Image (cartoon, rainbow, N blue to C red):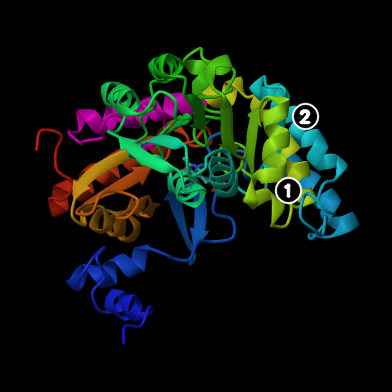
Amino acid sequence: MADIFDKVAGFLRESPIVGGKDRAIAESVLYRHSPLDNAGPWIEIEGRSVLQFSTNDYLGLARHPRLRQAAMEIVSKYGVSSPMGARPLTGTTELHDELERELAAFKRTEAALVFSNGAQAMMGCVAALAGPKDLIVMDQYAHASLVCGARISGARTRFFQHNDVGDLDAVLTKAPPEQAKMVVVDGVYSMQGDMAPLDVVSDICRQHGARLIVDDAHGTGVCGANGRGTAELFGVEDRVDLHLGTCSKAMATVGGFAAGDAGLMEFLQFNAPTILFTKAMPSCVAAATLEALKLLRDGHERRTALWENARRLQDGLVQAGFNIGQTCSPITPIHGNGTDAIHMCTALYQEHDIWVSAVLYPAVALGTSILRAIPTAAHSAQDVQKLLASVTAVRDACGTAPRAED
Ligand SMILES: Cc1ncc(COP(=O)(O)O)c(C=O)c1O
């Protein structure tokens, strides 16, 4: 008789991700221990000073004293667990209300809703809004949490080719006009670093009567003149029906949020399974996130530094012949075949004291890998130069990471 756990033994025998001798090396880079203080450009690991380009601390706020102080005040008075309970019952405090008001003001929407993390915001909102009779049309590279939401919803889900607006239009054109539809995209794609062309996407949505939902996890705080995200950058804030975001990247805390019309937020409050049936965001996190949001709103200098570092790094990589794809955000993928990225990641760490994450299937297509470098506002120009020199030396020494023309 078949055992549903047979797949476990199969995975342990021969992982589809990496096999043979690469397996041991993959295991040494994935789930590797990170120090508790892991967000700064320079971190201490086993007595070594290591330069890291691996976190989404875009604005360099993770160690900011105002965030620490805000969280500590709550922890010292009320503990880590406050509020005990799920949002609808005992988990909504004045800090949650204040954070929701501030997020709505920042996103220029009527209201906002705070979740315990970003994945729950994405998953729960998509799951609540679509049902078996509806159609969800998603970019093929949409974040896994959105795809999970679509699965939970039971709606028919169609994927369009990544950032191909012609294909999006074709998929919507084929759908019955009377069927209710929503289009779901990421503002910035977390592995490729490119952006959804929201101006065109929102036009197409209007033509087909489809609602537009944007997961702007990587755009919030980073894109747009005021850091309001990719919708601000493309001038379509009022044409996005539901803005989704996370507090775990530019805001450097943890949590997720939805922002939109007040009625929509009320609906989600009572229908998103991921807010109803889970413990609320801790108050200490809400307090730190409120500080982060203030810093983010006044964060022009930090954003300028972030984008300068991103340009410095990306121009340097292109000049050195690396393939960084179509990125137009600080996310900088160095594309490679097979397990190239793992080998480069290991050599950078062991020989150059640099930590850049290697990303493998299922986060990228099977048979490919990327070295994913994330410059932040906290890196210096010298840090970026060190990464450029080291990554080029590693590539030249071991012949990994194909050149752009390969
Ligand atoms: C595009 C995108 N959406 C959602 C999430 C989930 O956010 P969180 O880490 O807050 O759960 C992430 C984080 O990896 C992401 O990259």
Where in the figure is residue 318, as x and y percent of width and height? Answer: 23, 29
Question: In the rendered view, does 168 fall on the left or right side of 207?
Answer: left
Where in the figure is residue 362, as x and y percent of width and height? Answer: 32, 55
> Which residue corresponds to mark 1?
285
Q: Where residue 68 is drawn, which disc sits there?
A: none
Question: In the rendered view, does 5 fall on the left or right side of 162?
Answer: right
Quarter assignment of residue 26:
bottom left
Marker count (numbered): 2
> Which residue corresponds to mark 2?
101
Numbered range of the magenta stretch: 305-332
Give above or below for 7 relative to 121.
Answer: below
Mark whose residue sits in front, 1 or 2: 2
Tag 1: amino acid: Val
Within 10 Å of the Cα at label 1, are there few (<14), some (14-19), or many (20+) other Cα atoms? many
Tag 2: amino acid: Arg
**Quarter of the picture holding the C terminus:** top left
Residue under the point 50% across and 25% down: 211
Residue at disc 1, secondary structure = helix
Residue 3 visible to the viewer:
yes
Q: Is residue 311 magenta?
A: yes
Within 10 Å of the Cα at label 2, are there few (<14), some (14-19), or many (20+) other Cα atoms? some
Where in the figure is residue 231, as x and y percent of width and height? Answer: 51, 20
Residue 225 visible to the viewer:
no
View extreme (bottom): residue: 1
Give above or below for 210 relative to 392.
Answer: above
